[in-house]
Amino acid sequence: MKIGIVCYPTYGGSGVLATELGLGLAKRGHQVHFITYRQPARLTAFQENVFYHEVSSADYPLFEFTPYDTALASKLVEVVKYENLDLLHVHYAIPHAAVAYMAKKILLTEGRYVPTITTLHGTDITLVGSNQAFAPVVAFSINKSDGVTAVSKSLREQTYEYFDIRKDIEVIYNFIDFNRFKKHNLDHFKKAIAPNGERILIHTSNFRKVKRVDDVIRVFKKVADVMPAKLLLVGDGPERSHLESLCRELKICNHVSFLGKQDAVEELLDVADVFLMPSETESFGLAALEAMACEVPVISSDTGGLPEVNIHGKTGFLSPVGDVEDMAKNTIKLLQDDKMLERFRKNALENARLYDIKNILPQYEAYYEQILASAVYDD
């Protein structure tokens, strides 16, 4: 099968998942063509059956903003025609689903029909849900897709709630590659971070307000008041300056490390005792799943798709959004009981294995076959 994948080429969850999906499909013998404005972050080495097509859009004095949508539509038409693609799989409704529809209409004028599948990842739905200016285009684009998937049941229900959707939405969960995310037993690394046997808490994100990283710091403060502990903050973003100020205000700077963006995040997860994820909203919680694959229990909010990934009282604990007291209480309870911590570690790994890429790839392949067999022109 020849598949075109359109995604944002960033470190964000949708870009990572789209790239890993394409690489996994290529290993299973499919020909995969990535089509985007920059080489995806995880597309770092040559692999058989993988191709990259860069979308370049020239700057014209007439335009205040470069018309990327138009350039992408033109590139999709070109790649479908000359690489003879069987289908297009676009990740993120904005603008990719709308652009895919435009490309499909152009190809129809030449007697070529290419089915399109749209995968919804979260903020493309939740942010637009609070900004109705985009709603008509998003709903139209989803309804005109031949197939639609969402990364959690929660996101599927939100999509039906926010928009007038007449398509069946298939839930295919996010996944991880256990060749990368697994426990490595880097005891020497752990000793360097916590030389006196301190408990290690960790958080990874893009440091936006929606991630509520200030709650991470406040939870850690309460934990550190009870036991020796260290906090690793992995990532960067607009909230970093505020977070650094908060650490100074709480007088915990000597116990908190801002590590910036890291490619080998699995090595940091490997040494952690607890992963903190107090997000305002999460469509799935890929970072939590990565932690669980490294045998790290999760303390998280109970929003969005997180309860589908983090099982309360088994792989970690769930608390209402913003309930720092409850998150801290659960963290302390877990870290003070070695037997419970070890049990939760094993449970986290066991649950994470359900989302192994080896289990999820066949679901995408089956869905592709279903759409290819049933897709019909719908004007």
Image: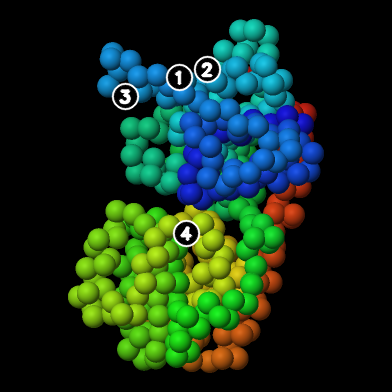
- Image-quadrant location for residue 193: bottom left
**x 35%, y 19%: residue:** 59
Residue at the spot of label 4 = 262
In the displayed image of the protein, which residue is found farthest to the left? Answer: 249
Q: Is residue 10 above or below residue 152?
A: above
- Image-quadrant location for residue 267: bottom right
Q: Is residue 281 above or below residue 62?
A: below
**Quick one: label 4 or label 2, which is nearer the N terminus?**
2
Residue at the spot of label 3 = 65
Front: mark 4 or 2: 4
In the rendered structure, which amino acid carries the disc numbered 2? Ser
Q: Position of residue 122 (x, y in %)?
A: 48, 47
Q: Are marks 2 and 1 in contact (CB under 8 Å)?
A: yes
Front: mark 1 or 4: 4
**Disc 3 from disc 4: Cα separation:** 31 Å
Residue at the spot of label 1 = 70
Can the viewer see residue 81 in this picture?
Answer: yes
Q: Position of residue 334 (x, y in %)?
A: 50, 85
Q: Nearest the camera: 20 or 260?
A: 260
Mark 1 crowdedness (10 Å alpha carbons): few <14, some 14-19, many ≥20: some
Q: Are marks 2 and 3 in contact (CB under 8 Å)?
A: no
Q: Nearest the camera: 25 or 86?
A: 25
**Quick one: label 1 or label 3, which is nearer the N terminus?**
3
Disc 3 element: loop
Residue at the spot of label 2 = 74
Disc 2 element: helix
In the rendered structure, which amino acid carries the disc numbered 4? Gln
**Disc 1 from disc 3: Cα separation:** 12 Å
